[in-house]
Amino acid sequence: MIRRELLWTAGALGLGAVLPRGLMAQQKKVFALVPKLVGVPFYADVEAGCKEQAAKMGVECLFTGPTAVDEAEQVRVIRDLITRNVSGLAIAPNNPESVASAITAAQAKGIPVITFDSDAPKSKRTAFVGTDNRGGGELGGKAFRAALPGGGTYAIVTGGLAADNLNARIAGFKAGLGDGFKEVAGSPYPCEDDSSRGIQIVQDVLAKNPNLSGFFFSGGWPMFAPEAYTRAVRSRADAMKAGKFVVVAFDVQDPQLRLLKSGLATALVGQRPRAMGAQSLVALNALLAKESVAPVIDTGVDLVDAKNVDQFLSK
């Protein structure tokens, strides 16, 4: 009778958090992952990895976030999850500064918080799970230089200008590129993680810079719409296939691999998004159990070019 009354009282008052400890323990743990935005191929793979790992662990992966790159909306989603008292939070910040106070609020409530894909190193997050973005960018810069050893001019298409992970990739790219190259005025160009906008930028940059030697995409956005991308770079297609125009991009989504196979890209820096989703869940579960985790969990990168693209297409 006491147990039934406790349940009725908590339900009637909306106070699930005051249930007896024994009852709370019976509830499935819910770990929430909040990407920069939902509905894009890369984060779909992160979600798949998270949910595969959740099934193995007997927990729930709640994958939720804004439908467009929107700092305020991402913070609203995070604060809603804090109110719902999820078991743990993994966040890919659009802007490290915008999420810092929400991370502090979650930790104060006893909800462990990590970042994935994009970091917020000055916040109170406990760990970062994802790519060594600077190292991956440097790998891309070296691939660009190897393709154009004589140097040239380049433009960068990025997502949001405040994103920590993208800025680290750009810094690494420039370090790997070295001397002999010049960035065009206005670069990097932000597409706000929107494929259509990314393609428009490519078209505009090519029109304004007829002597451009190549592009670096800090994410694969223009290539996620392969038919439109093919039209956008049509004027450079023959030069690209001859190795005289270079496109190096992050990510190895299927459309990108097929474009690389057809000669419309030079090299791809592949992240491992499924591992990102899975390892985020493992880290949060460990932190909830008061276990320690490494401050940085590197999920690794792969360099894909014409020599090994078939290997990745077959996966």
Image (cartoon, helix red, strand yellow):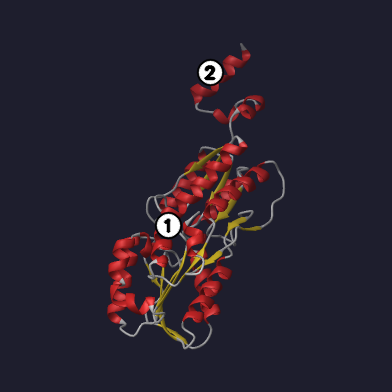
Disc 1 target residue: 254
Say above or below: 151 vs 131: below
Residue 45 appears in the rendering: yes
Q: Residue furthest top?
A: 1
Q: Nearer the viewer, residue 138 or 187?
A: 138
Disc 1, SS: helix
The residue closer to the viewer here, 189 or 110, is 189
For residue 90, side relative to residue 283 (left or right):
left
Q: Amino acid at mark 2?
A: Trp
Residue 302 on image: x %, y %: 55, 64
Q: 124 or 264, which is in the foreground?
A: 264
Where does label 2 land, which residue? 8
Which one is nearer the viewer's eye here, 238 or 299? Answer: 238
Q: Tell me if residue 119 comes above or below residue 210 in the rendering.
A: above
Relative to 168, is 75 above or below?
above
Q: Residue 265 lies in what quarter of the image?
A: bottom left
Residue at 44% across, 51% down: 74
